[in-house]
């Protein structure tokens, strides 16, 4: 590879990729262990060795019990005032924007090592909506991401909607014109685009819609419905008869909010709640995983159950690491019930996309799925139900957007 200055960067809620254009086509670089996807995770070890890890290495260090702090789903913070808040790392406090910058800087560094060139231009993917129904927050989120990209050495930064990028990659395999609905179902957002592709003329985007619903939301819904009762949610009341506060259980079920649980004031709250609880042993479980800094481990178990349900009607999480013989069983029907409001939001976004494009569902020729959440059978089934007679194409769930961004970077910067 030579003379490569531009790249496409898909910074995802769950996974990230980086692509360059070489030998007449976009190519995803293999940035970790020979794989093109890098989990969007960071791990800060102890201060004495200043350990900083990203991706699978970050998750493995946490799972192996290395002392330190794991952070995931940082993209969810974009457009939020929390981005500039400072959090303890190496016994000092840095902003979440700096943490995202360190993660993306490491990806950029690895890509430059592989290409042998300094990457100075980037097309970054962005969801149609970073934040639902808040245009000011969406503008701010894009600016936040642009500022971070420039702070790590990119001189030219531009953006493309993620489903449109996926459509660029899909179009490379078409030989005839198609009216496509692109369903990009990621870890933090779900985006839909209706685009005319593969004709003699430049692709025509008819409509883009998006909603802040993704894989992490399905994790949260499943956790609240089936896991949190074992830690006190709903089944636990104060002796006064008042409900326990909901916020701790939401934080324990949300990847981007787990850090809240490690604040000293939170442990004080938990102990006070335990003292006033009718079933204090449930709070003891909560206190244990916070003390052991194993909150991410619990959400990993939730995520694993969700993935198991892609292949089976019932799954089980073995929580022996919390308490002997503690298990949580979930059926696919229970999972779908827990996520009913999320399915409704996806449906509304699809309906709006069709309305904005001014077409009916029967006009769609092909339904193109990409994004990790498209692997959930219930999600695919409910979306495909709108288009019973169309061709269904499965794109690279984790690479289609990155490949399209690499192609867009070549088109824009040459």
Image (cartoon, rainbow, N blue to C red):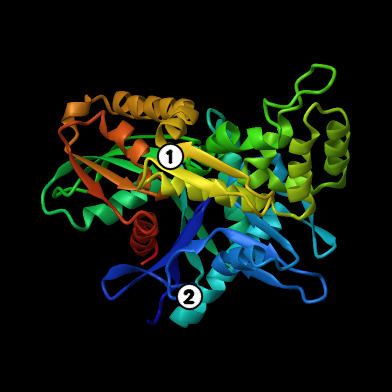
Name the residue: 31% across, 23% down.
355
Tell me the number on the disc at residue 190.
1
Disc 2 residue crowd, few under 14, some 14–19, many 20+, Cα 10 Å: few
Please provide percent x and percent y for residue 390: 17, 36
Quadrant location of the N terminus in the rendered image: bottom left
Q: Nearer the viewer, residue 212 or 201?
A: 212
Q: Quadrant of residue 139?
A: top right
Depicted 305 relative to depicted 31: above or below? above
- Residue on which disc 2 sits: 33
Residue 33: in sight, yes or no? Answer: yes
Q: Is 161 positioned to the left or the right of 202 in the image? A: right
What secondary structure is found at the residue carrying circle 1?
Answer: strand
- In which quadrant of the rendered image does the C terminus lie? bottom left
Residue 396 sits in which quadrant? bottom left
Please indicate, yes or no, whether residue 151 appears anywhere in the rendered image. no
User: Left of 75 or right of it: where is 92?
Assistant: right
Question: Left or right: where does residue 132 sit relative to residue 61?
Answer: left
In-front residue for pair 61/383: 61
Rendered image quadrant of residue 40: bottom right
Which tag is nearer the camera, tag 1 or tag 2? 2
Q: Residue furthest left?
A: 176
- Residue 8's spot in the image, x, y percent? 43, 62
Tell me if mark 1 has few (under 14), some (14-19) or many (20+) residues whose alpha carbon lies within 10 angstroms of its own. many
Residue at (60, 38) in percent of width and height: 227
Q: Position of residue 379 (x, y in %)?
A: 37, 37
The circle on residue 316 is none
Residue depicted at x 22% and y 58%: 172
Determine the residue positioned at 48% across, 75% down.
Answer: 33
In terms of secondary structure, where does tag 2 sit? loop
């Amino acid at each position: 590879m030579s003379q490569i200055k531009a790249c496409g960067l898909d910074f995802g809620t769950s996974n990230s990729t980086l692509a360059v254009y070489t030998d007449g086509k976009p190519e995803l670089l293999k940035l970790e262990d020979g794989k093109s996807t890098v989990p969007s995770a960071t791990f800060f070890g102890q201060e004495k060795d200043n350990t900083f890890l990203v991706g699978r290495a970050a998750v493995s260090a946490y799972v192996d019990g290395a002392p330190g702090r794991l952070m995931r789903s940082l993209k969810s913070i974009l457009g939020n005032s929390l981005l500039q808040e400072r959090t303890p790392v190496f016994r000092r406090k840095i902003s979440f924007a700096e943490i995202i910058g360190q993660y993306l800087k490491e990806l950029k560094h690895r890509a430059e090592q592989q290409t042998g060139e300094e990457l100075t231009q980037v097309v970054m993917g962005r969801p149609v909506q970073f934040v639902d129904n808040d245009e000011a927050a969406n503008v701010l989120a894009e600016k936040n991401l642009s500022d971070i990209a420039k702070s790590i050495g990119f001189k030219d930064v531009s953006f493309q909607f993620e489903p449109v990028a996926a459509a660029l990659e899909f179009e490379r395999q078409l030989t005839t014109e198609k009216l496509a609905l692109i369903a990009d179902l990621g870890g933090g957002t779900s985006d839909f685009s209706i685009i005319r592709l593969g004709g003699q003329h430049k692709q025509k985007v008819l409509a883009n819609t998006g909603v802040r619903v993704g894989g992490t939301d399905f994790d949260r819904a499943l956790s609240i419905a089936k896991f949190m009762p074992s830690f006190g949610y709903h089944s636990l009341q104060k002796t006064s008869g008042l409900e326990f506060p909901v916020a701790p259980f939401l934080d324990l079920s949300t990847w981007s909010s787990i850090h809240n649980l490690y604040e000293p004031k939170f442990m004080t709250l938990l102990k006070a709640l335990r003292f006033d609880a009718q079933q204090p042993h449930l709070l003891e479980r909560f206190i244990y995983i916070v003390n052991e800094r194993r909150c991410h481990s619990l959400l990993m178990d939730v995520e694993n159950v969700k993935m198991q349900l892609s292949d089976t009607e019932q799954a089980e999480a073995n929580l022996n690491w919390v308490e002997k013989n503690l298990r949580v069983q979930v059926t696919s029907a229970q999972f779908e019930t827990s996520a009913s409001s999320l399915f409704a939001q996806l449906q509304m976004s699809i309906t709006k996309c069709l309305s904005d494009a001014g077409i009916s569902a029967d006009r769609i020729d092909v339904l193109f799925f990409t994004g990790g959440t498209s692997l959930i059978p219930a999600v695919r089934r409910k979306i495909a139900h709108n288009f019973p007679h169309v061709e269904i194409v499965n794109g690279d769930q984790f690479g289609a957007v990155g490949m399209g961004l690499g192609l867009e970077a070549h088109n824009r910067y040459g």
